[in-house]
Amino acid sequence: MEKQSKVYRTYLQILKEELIPAMGCTEPISIAYAAAKAREVLGCTPDMVKIGVSNNIIKNVKSVVVPNTDGMKGIEAAAAAGIVGGHADKALEVISEVTAEQKGSMRSFMKEVPISVEAIDNGFIFDIIVALYHGADSAVVRICRYHTNIVFIQKNSDILLDNTAAESKPACGGDNPAEDGLSDRNLLTIADIFDFANTCDTADVCPVLDTQIQYNTQISEEGLLGDYGANIGSTMLKFYGDDVRNRAIAKAAAGSDARMSGCELPVVINSGSGNQGITVSVPVIEYAKALAVPKDRLYRALALSNLIAIHEKTGIGRLSAYCGAVSAGCAAGCGIAYLQGADLKAISHTLVNSLAIVSGIICDGAKPSCAAKIASSVQAGIMGYHMYQNGQQFRGGDGIVTKGVENTIRNVSQLGREGMRETDKEIVKIMLQES
């Protein structure tokens, strides 16, 4: 692929846009980011806070620990963290520099300042509105569609930013909903991703991939060392052995368990998700170590796995009732296959096989069980490749599988975006009943 071609430049930009550092589960961190920005605009500590969030934000914030808060959970805690200790210029690392004194101040703030939260439905799956008040002054910040996309800022009666007109088409509509300000994901295809991985100048991709390798390896190792969540990673190693396959699965799960339980190490995300960033990279990194492949080969495999995961998620959307770990785990299987010399045909069959196995996993919010879903998805990704190596495959007409990898991806997109929309509502309803 020519470096000056539109596809090459777009793929490189997609990697730069998607593979960014984040601290903690990205939905509460996005709330903290909006709150920190609103606090910056207001210019002082508020005496009242009002928050509106879409149902999927409620789902993904309810059960995870917000890092740097001494174990607090929930929308109110995320907002308080951003207001008291956040630095808006650090985006998804907004609360990475919280002091011990500020942690204590967060609890005091939540006791002393009224914070109200309401569910909103403006037609967007991802929607956060934070309004802060101090006396007669107010500040409003809205994030819509994706985690760092601030579309509206207002101080008192002065509108400082208004990109809401550009967001008038809800993200749940269309075949592949566009995200304004981001590169065109509709240019992604498995064939071109494979070509890009084979021919890209690794100097172009190594800056983002080196950070992904470093951060995501560190948190996966911390997950195995500590007592986090349901300890899925250590359970895998204890009962199933420590060969490379089980280590790849266990380390990815352990990274998620640490992250869901408030570990303060950052991760490099994929498709807006730290869990997906861990899942799509750590198994590939573990296999690269075991196979002793050159660093150049690892970069190419990670470029492939990351772009395939983004391709899968483009038609589904950032948030859905369809578990994002599935997309990432299946893409990791493709990256592992690539490390072992798989060609385009093998990569395509690996993806289709693995999607056929685990596409039924639901997303019922961010919480410890994500680690177990990651383990199942990575296992399916590896099995998908081993099936191909054994001359086996799922064929068109087998359920949602149809002839051609792109057609199967479209079917999965339709399932996750349209077919599971009512499922998503029921999941949120059930979760709120359990509150």
Image (cartoon, grey):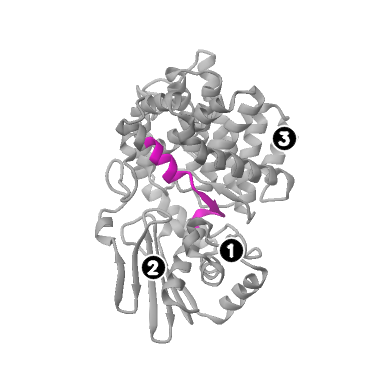
Q: Position of residue 172 (x, y in %)?
A: 32, 49
Q: Amino acid at mark 1?
A: Lys
Q: Position of residue 27 (x, y in %)?
A: 48, 56
Label 2 to label 3: alpha-carbon separation: 45 Å
Q: Position of residue 405 (x, y in %)?
A: 38, 25
Label 3 to label 1: alpha-carbon separation: 29 Å
Whether the magenta-drawn stretch holds residue 44 is answered as: no
Whether the magenta-drawn stretch holds residue 14 is answered as: yes
Which type of secondary structure does the marked residue at label 1 adopt? loop
Q: Quadrant of the N terminus?
A: top left
Q: Position of residue 277 (x, y in %)?
A: 52, 42
What residue would you read off at disc 3? 237
2 or 3: tag closer to the N-terminus? 2
Residue at 67% over, 27% down: 244
Tell me the quarter of the picture where residue 403 sits: top left
Residue at 40% over, 53% down: 146
Which type of secondary structure does the marked residue at label 3 adopt? helix
| Res. 373 in view | yes
Q: Is residue 95 left or right of residue 270?
A: right
Q: Quadrant of the C terminus?
A: bottom right
What residue would you read off at disc 2? 141
**Which span of residues is magenta-colored?**
11-27
Q: Is residue 71 above or below residue 241?
A: below
Which type of secondary structure does the marked residue at label 2 adopt? strand
Crowding near the residue tagged with mark 3, few <14, some 14–19, many ≥20 C-alpha atoms within 10 Å: some
What residue would you read off at disc 1? 73
3 or 1: tag closer to the N-terminus? 1
Tell me the quarter of the picture where residue 372 sits: top right
Q: Amino acid at mark 3?
A: Leu
| Res. 431 in view | no
Crowding near the residue tagged with mark 2, few <14, some 14–19, many ≥20 C-alpha atoms within 10 Å: many
Residue at 53% over, 15% down: 389
